[in-house]
Image: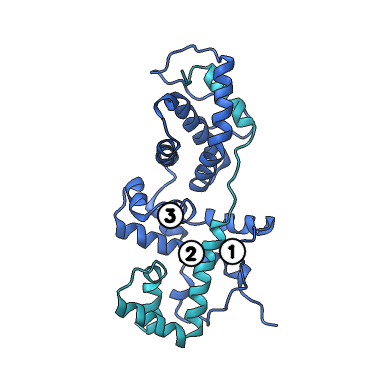
Chain colours: A cyan, B blue
């Protein structure tokens, strides 16, 4: 396994700040020397950030009518 | 659970434990409307991310909202209701999926492509263009990113949605999904790698 593969393995814990000092130093040192791994880490972080910015999806308004119809059928209800 | 389609008014199957028939009083209607507007978006959004079909997400949302209406008097705080909502929504969504036998190891492994960094002759990774943290995603980006999340195999998407999109801790995700902590971390890592690869064509910088 080359150094890049080892870094890919450790990426998750590196991002979560969950590596022991030796592995953390290994990854940080490699990132300084390897533009490709550095770009990979950057894109790994950005992919998660992009997904986190997805807005909430509202339910279709007609679902409220379904809910009320279900209540009429006796499927549930608050007291 | 109904196999309903969007736009159809299809009541849920009556629960034998519920008193019926039950007229919807004006008070109950107001409560249902309030619960729908307060909790519907959160429930639907989570269900829509765990399931790939609008109709399934609607069925799950209706089922969970009915349970909320039944249990509402038992909740005294928003935080207790919030935790409970997560659990019920996740369980209902996963239950529906199991019921329809859509989930299988075979599907998960079948969906998996080889990750870019695992390819034998991988090219140097291109840097991505800036993605300002505060800026809202434009419509096209929303569609691209949402589609990439939906294309994640279920085994990985479940963990990704709960941990990275909903912000639950890894231990809590493991508890909800019945997974060990190492399994959660492994699947989450894999999901992120797959998402990164799926989004790379849209975000890699184009050489000037």
Measure the C-alpha gap from mark 3 to mark 2.
15 Å
**Residue at the image position 44 percent from the left and 58 percent from the top:** B110
Q: Nearer the viewer, residue A21 or A9?
A: A21
Quarter placement of the C terminus of chain B: bottom right
Percent across and percent down for residue B21 are 49, 11
Vertical comparison of B25 with B199: above or below: above
Q: Nearer the viewer, residue A14 or A2?
A: A14
According to the image, label 2 marks what residue? B194
Q: Which mark is residue B133?
A: 1
Percent across and percent down for residue B75 are 41, 30
Vertical comparison of B121 with A64: above or below: below
**Residue at the image position 42 percent from the left and 39 percent from the top:** B79
Q: Mark 3 or mark 2, which has the lower sequence index?
A: 3
- Where disc 3 sits, the SS reads helix
Tag 3 subunit: B
Q: Mark 1 or mark 2, which has the lower sequence index?
A: 1
Percent across and percent down for residue B136 are 64, 57
Q: Which mark is residue B163?
A: 3
Question: Would residue A64 be found to the left or right of residue B182 on screen?
Answer: right
């Amino acid at each position: 396994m080359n150094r890049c593969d080892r870094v890919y393995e450790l990426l998750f814990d590196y991002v979560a700040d969950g590596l022991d000092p030796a592995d953390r130093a290994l990854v940080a040192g490699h990132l300084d020397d390897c533009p490709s791994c550095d770009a990979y880490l950057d894109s790994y972080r950005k992919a998660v950030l992009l997904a986190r910015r997805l807005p909430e999806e509202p339910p279709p308004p007609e679902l409220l009518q379904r809910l009320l119809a279900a209540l009429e059928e006796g499927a549930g209800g608050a007291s | 659970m109904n196999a309903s389609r969007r736009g159809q008014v299809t009541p849920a199957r009556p629960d034998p434990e519920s008193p019926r028939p039950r007229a919807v009083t004006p008070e109950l209607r107001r409560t249902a409307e309030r619960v729908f507007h307060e909790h519907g978006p959160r429930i639907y959004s989570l269900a829509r991310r765990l399931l790939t079909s609008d109709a399934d997400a609607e069925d799950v949302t209706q089922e969970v909202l009915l349970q909320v209406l039944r249990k509402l008097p038992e909740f005294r705080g928003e935080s207790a209701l919030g935790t409970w909502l997560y659990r019920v929504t996740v369980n209902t969504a996963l239950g529906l999926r199991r019921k329809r036998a859509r989930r299988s190891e075979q599907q998960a492994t079948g969906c998996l492509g080889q990750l870019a960094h695992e390819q034998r002759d991988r090219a140097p990774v291109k840097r991505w263009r800036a993605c300002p943290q505060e800026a809202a995603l434009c419509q096209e980006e929303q569609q691209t990113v949402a589609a990439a999340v939906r294309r994640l195999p279920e085994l990985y998407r479940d963990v990704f949605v709960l941990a990275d999109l909903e912000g639950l801790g890894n231990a809590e995700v493991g508890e909800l999904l019945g997974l060990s902590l190492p399994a959660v971390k492994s699947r989450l890592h894999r999901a992120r790698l797959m998402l990164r690869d799926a989004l790379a064509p849209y975000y890699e910088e184009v050489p000037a």
